[in-house]
Image: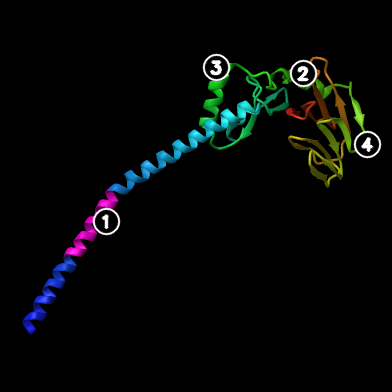
Amino acid sequence: MREFFRGWRRKAGLATLAMGASLVALLLVAMVIAPFLYREYREARFDEIRRNEREQADRHWKRQEAEIYIGRAERDLYVREINGVTIRDEFDTQTGLHFTFYDRGEAYNTRVRELLASEGVPEWSMKPHLVRDTDLIAMLDSLDREEITKFPHELTDGIILMRRGTISRWNSHISNDKDSLSIVTRYVMISAGNEVEPVYVGTNPNYPRVIFIRSGSTMIHALHTEGRHLSTAYR
C-alpha cells in the first residue's frame, strides 16, 4: 500500500510539474503574441476611425456644412495681430469653411481637401463674405454706425442682440443673465465683453451680407446676416 501511495504521489508531482510547465509555456506564448494582437487591434481601430471621419466629411459636404478641424495649439491659423489689433477668424480665409476645434480629424480634413481639389471652393462657403483685415480694423474705428439702446434687438432673422432676459427662438429658450452684450444666432451665442458698454451696429457696402457689431470702442464682430460669426477684432 505504501508503494502505491508513493507511486501516486510521484505521478501527481510529475503531473503538477507538467501542468506548471504548460502554464509557463502558455504564458510565454501569450507574452510574445499579445503585442502583435494589440497592434492589430489598434490598427483596425484607427482604420475604423479614419473611415468614419472620411464618411462624415462626405456627409457634411453634401449637407453644405463641411468644416476644417484644428487643434487649439494651432492658434496661428486663426489669430494674428496687426498694428496692436488682434484679429480672430472663425472661418478659413482660403476656403471659407468653418474652423472647429478637435484634437483628431486628420482623415476628415484629408477628405475635405480632396473634395476641394476635385470640386473647388463650394458656392455655399463663406469665402465671398469674409472681411479683409484692413476693413475690419477700419470698422472698429469707424464713426459711421448706429447705436442700439433697447434690448432684445432683432437685427435680422438670424441675429438678436440681448442684455438680461429670455427669448424663445429657433425652437429653444435663450437666456442672458448679465448686463453685458450677448449676440445670439441660430449657430452661436457670443458673449461680447464683461462690462456694460455702448453697442453700435454698422455696415460696409463692400460686404452687403455682413453686419458689424461693436461693443464699446475695443471690440467688433463681423457676422453674416443669417447668423454666421465670421471674425472678431479687438484691442
Disc 2/disc 1 C-alpha distance (Å): 70 Å
Q: Identify the mark nearer the N-term, 1 or 3.
A: 1
Tell me the tag on residue 118: 3
State how the image is colored: rainbow
Nearer the viewer's eye, disc 1 or disc 3? 3
Tell me the residue that label 2 is attached to. 135
Position of residue 163 relative to residue 57, above or below, is below
Position of residue 81 relative to residue 151, above or below, is above
Disc 1/disc 4 C-alpha distance (Å): 75 Å
Tell me the tag on residue 27: 1
Q: Quadrant of the C terminus?
A: top right
Q: Are marks 2 and 1 in contact (CB under 8 Å)?
A: no
Please name the amino acid that badge 1 sits on: Leu
Nearer the viewer's eye, disc 4 or disc 2? 4
Prevailing secondary structure of the magenta residues: helix
Q: Which residues are magenta?
A: 18-32
Tell me the residue that label 4 is attached to. 150
